[in-house]
Amino acid sequence: MKILQIVTQGEHGGAQVYVKTSSTALVAKGYDVYVATGIQSTSKDQWLFEELSTQGFKSSQLRIVQ
């Protein structure tokens, strides 16, 4: 099963900690987990992806044009 978790920003906060914790737990149970955030305009917005990368998650960027 593939799971996509979406959070508005990647900065350090309660929602981001939850996404990190639950994503790591879901991967340990064998799920394919993807995480998406809104635009990362400052270095603070990188916190979630930096944390997930230490857990073996790979990162890529998706650009949505309106």
Image: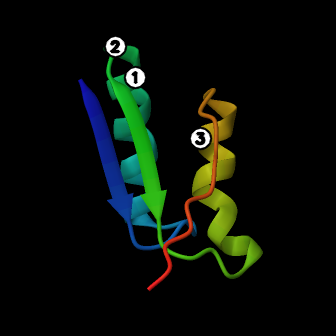
Q: Residue furthest right?
A: 43
42 up-or-down from 55: above or below: below
Mark 3, residue position: 52
Element type where label 3 sits in the image: helix
Residue at the spot x=62%, y=51% of the render? 49
Say which residue appears at 63% left-offset and 48% top-offset.
60
Residue 12, quarter of the rendered image: bottom right
Cα–Cα span, label 3 and label 1? 11 Å
Secondary structure found at label 2: loop
- Compared across the picture, whether 37 is left or right of 12 comes to left
**Residue 64 in the image: x percent, y percent?**
49, 73
**Could you tell me how far apart the alpha carbons at marks 2 and 1 are, in whole angstroms?**
5 Å
Q: Which residue is mark 1?
A: 27
Q: What is the quadrant of the N terminus in the image?
A: top left
Lower position in the chain sequence, tag 3 or tag 2: 2
Q: Position of residue 43 (x, y in %)?
A: 76, 73
Q: Which residue is mark 2?
A: 30
| Crowd band around label 3 with a 10 angstrom C-alpha radius: few (<14), some (14–19), many (20+) | some
Label 3 – label 2 distance at C-alpha: 16 Å
Q: In the rendering, which numbered label is found on residue 45?
A: none
